[in-house]
Amino acid sequence: MNVLASRRLGRWATRRSNSYWKRFRCFSSSCTADFVGEAEEVHFPVIIVGAGPVGLVLSFLLTKLGVKCAVLDKSPAFSRHPQAHFINNRSMEVINIFLHSSEAWFKDIQKLQPPLDFWRKFIYCTSVSGYNLGSVDHMQSQDFEKKISPECVAHYSQYKLIQLLLRKLENLGLTLCTPDELQQLSHCLLKDKRIFMGLECTSIKPIAEGIKVGACFLKEGKLEAINFHCSYLIGSDGARSTVRKLVGIKMQGEHNLKNLISVHFLSKDLGEYLLHKRPGMLFFIFNYEAIGVLVAHDLNEGEFVLQVPYYPPQQNIEDFSSKVCEEIIFKLVGWNLEDVQVKDIKPWVMHAKLQRSMFHAMGESFLWAMLLTASHPLVALE
Ligand SMILES: Cc1cc2nc3c(=O)[nH]c(=O)nc-3n(C[C@H](O)[C@H](O)[C@H](O)COP(=O)(O)OP(=O)(O)OC[C@H]3O[C@@H](n4cnc5c(N)ncnc54)[C@H](O)[C@@H]3O)c2cc1C
């Protein structure tokens, strides 16, 4: 959204709002704190809810355009559990358009990602060291000839992308406000160009001057509420968006298509082995003892994620301890990795859902978007 477009949007929204105010109501999530009358109210022209790749790219863009914004994220810290790793052409185009290819930022991804030959293949096998059922080179000539897109796809873990973005944002003067700093709640902290970690958006209410946003954070084990006031609110809070739910935008499609356990682990030995014997990005492994998809995030660093299907209610996440996950890894790899380190175990669910609208006018505007899944808009991963 450029400045001109946002001004037009603002004028349109204000005209529309006149009739809206007469029937406004407060939107709030049922489980958390609502607006607190006496609480401090801080004003930002734009509030972005969610510091994922979308929220951070957007804050970068707005700050470059001179639009003051603040970002709220309910997580106290950025996750190091790798999620996305394959960045499609469209996302690279967006990154490039927004952040300009002349910026080292964009070149960093190309430079920092593993060499193409390490990740161009999908491999189907009975175990990492076992029988090779087949392999597919998923890179096609169109990926290199730049006929369908001016940008090449990339292989780079989402948490590394986030770190890269944070460094770029810091150069623009946007800094992180940690939950500890937030607890001080001094007014000087509550200014724009901040990414407030551990601050959850819980309610939204149109008011004559814009939008009132209720948020809460944990202070000494108790929920503390704070109110903000903004002209524009942008929900970039992921597949389970609170903003989307608060404004009543529905999702359509299939629910709970597949439940998976995602095991983030490190093993230099496995990385070494694959680099020399069978480099690839995804390993679809099937044998009598286990099945799973091994995602090679970085063979040089020996960083992997194993996706294992599981079947609730017969199984649940507690069944997948580090020990159990190690055993599954060994069965799929084909030998006991001495240096395996399980970092994190998380469940996730695959849905095939589409949001009815990306925009909700409530006096001012709401926008909700997903950057990384631009070429797979039907898939929402939680
Ligand atoms: C296992 C897995 C593998 C994936 N692999 C790929 C891949 O290879 N390629 C690809 O393109 N995509 C992939 N994806 C999808 C990709 O991760 C998402 O599309 C991407 O994270 C969306 O970015 P986002 O910024 O929209 O949302 P998110 O990354 O989900 O960020 C949303 C942020 O909003 C915060 N938030 C939520 N609610 C609130 C609230 N009420 N108040 C404040 N903050 C809030 C959250 O804490 C979070 O930090 C994968 C996803 C998973 C789970």
Image (cartoon, rainbow, N blue to C red):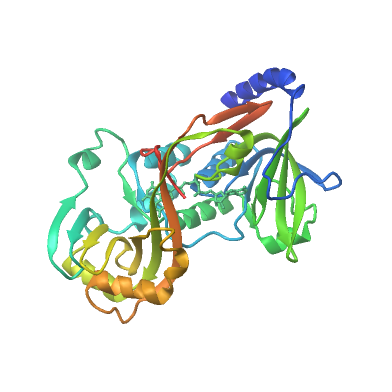
Residue in front for this viewpoint, 209 or 117: 209
Instruction: Point out the residue furthest to the right here.
Output: 38
Q: How many marks?
A: 0
Instruction: Point out the residue furthest to the bottom here.
Output: 338
Q: Is residue 263 left or right of residue 234?
A: left
| Residue 209 found in image quarter | top right
Residue 144 in the image: x percent, y percent? 22, 42
Q: Is residue 63 above or below residue 128?
A: above
Residue drawn where x is 52% and y is 51% of the image? 168
Residue 15 in the image: x percent, y percent? 69, 17
Residue 366 in the image: x percent, y percent? 60, 32
- Residue 220 appears in the figure: yes
Residue in front for this viewpoint, 207 or 110: 207
Q: Is residue 316 left or right of residue 286?
A: right
- Residue 1 appears in the figure: no
Q: Is residue 62 above or below residue 362?
A: below
Residue 354 in the image: x percent, y percent? 44, 35
Residue drawn where x is 74% and y is 23% of the image? 23
Quarter of the picture containing the N terminus is top right
Residue drawn where x is 16% and y is 68% of the image? 277
